[in-house]
Amino acid sequence: MREQLTPRNEDLGAAAGAPVADEHARVERAAAESTAPKSAFARLADSSAGRNSGLVLALVVICAIGLITKGDTFATTNNVWTILRLAAVGGVISVGMTFVIIAGGIDLSVGAIVALASVWATTTGTQDIGTFGIIFTSIVVATACGVINGVLIAYGKVVAFIATLAGLATYRGLAENLSDRKTQSIDTPSGFLDFFGAEPGGIPVLVIMFAVVAVLGWLLLNRTTFGRRTFAIGGNPEAARLAGINVKRQTVMLYALLGFLCGIATIMILARTSAGTSTHGNLYELDAIAAVVIGGTLLSGGRGTIVGTVFGVLIFQTLNNIFTLNNLTTSTQAVAKGLIIVAAVLLQQRVAKTSRS
């Protein structure tokens, strides 16, 4: 009688839609896979040293291509400084983009933010204040744009891709209206161009600024609670929320940080071009995302390094330099950039799959 009232295990498994014996075997296989020792290649691919070694090797190969195709102009001191000087502006933005992507976000409006900040900082009224006015306006305008993006994403529940795509159109449109699509030269005699265009010890100030931002970004990401929270919400936002992290506030702060760094990049591009225009920063978002992805940061969030991003910036800028030296058109360069991004993402997926095996 008792056996008739108590359902057997096989009956329970059939009711759940899967035999119990098969379910037990599946769980045991998953546990065995998770505890199985990884191959040497998988351990190397999963380590920072392995990823950075691959980036160094890629940079060496690209430099070899430059030497073979245009050795007489590529391997010169002036060309090396040109690469570093051009990499500096995009590098500062890429450092900020690394934080946002590690947290599982994206920002397509960084180029438009640079354009708006450059135009606002070079209006006649701002230039009348002098160097301080240009610096202050660049940083405040760009940071405000970043805060707006963050608030829309965190509190407005707008998908990051859509919110920043709208920002791209809006900020670029505001820049065109504010400047009437005219280039605004920096005419202030306050020494802005003299200071940021200087080369103390033969090293351009722009390169020094990039190095300082990269070091501070590394410290912020790897040695502070802010960095640990960034990794946490990128890995699993719900788990981060249950652990007591204010995910919404952290998200706003991340986009504000990226906006602030866009302000720094605006100052650098103003120093380099001595003018503000609504065309500044065109496709900067593509370059920044490409550099971050090439550097090994996962687009899905939860993993990434500032060192990898710096290598990604150098690789990307060196490629641009080789394209220019070989007289490739901008259209060809754009196609090449797109293919490189796709290849980098496919490689990421391959390495991630290998590291799990």
Image (cartoon, rainbow, N blue to C red):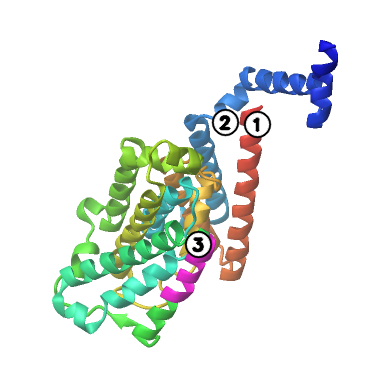
* Residue 279 visible in this rendered orientation of the protein: no
Main SS, magenta residues:
helix
Residue 121, position as x, y percentages in the image: 26, 74
Q: Provide the residue designation for mark 1.
A: 354
CA neighbours of label 1 inside 10 A, class few (<14), some (14 to 19), many (20+): some
Q: Quadrant of the N terminus?
A: top right
- Residue 261 location (% of width, % of height): 33, 57
User: Closer to the camera, 23 or 170?
Assistant: 23
Question: Of helix, strand and loop, which one carries label 2?
Answer: helix
Residue type pointed to by label 3: Val
Q: Quadrant of residue 215?
A: top left
Q: Which residue is mark 2?
A: 45
> x, y percentage for residue 6?
79, 16
Spatial CA distance of label 1 from label 2 is: 8 Å
Residues marked 1 and 2 touching at CB (< 8 Å): yes
* Magenta segment: 161-171
Which type of secondary structure does the marked residue at label 3 adopt?
Answer: loop
Of pointers 1 and 2, the one earlier in the residue sequence: 2
Mark 1 residue element:
helix
**Of circles 3 and 1, which is in front?**
3
Q: Residue at x 52, y 35 (%)?
A: 51
As shown in the figure, which amino acid type bears the numbered disc 2? Answer: Ala
Which image quarter holds the C terminus?
Answer: top right
Residue marked by disc 3? 158
Taking depth in this image into account, of 154 and 338 the one nearest to the observer is 154
Disc 3: CA contacts within 10 A as few (<14), some (14-19) or many (>=20): some
Q: Foreground mark, 1 or 2?
A: 1
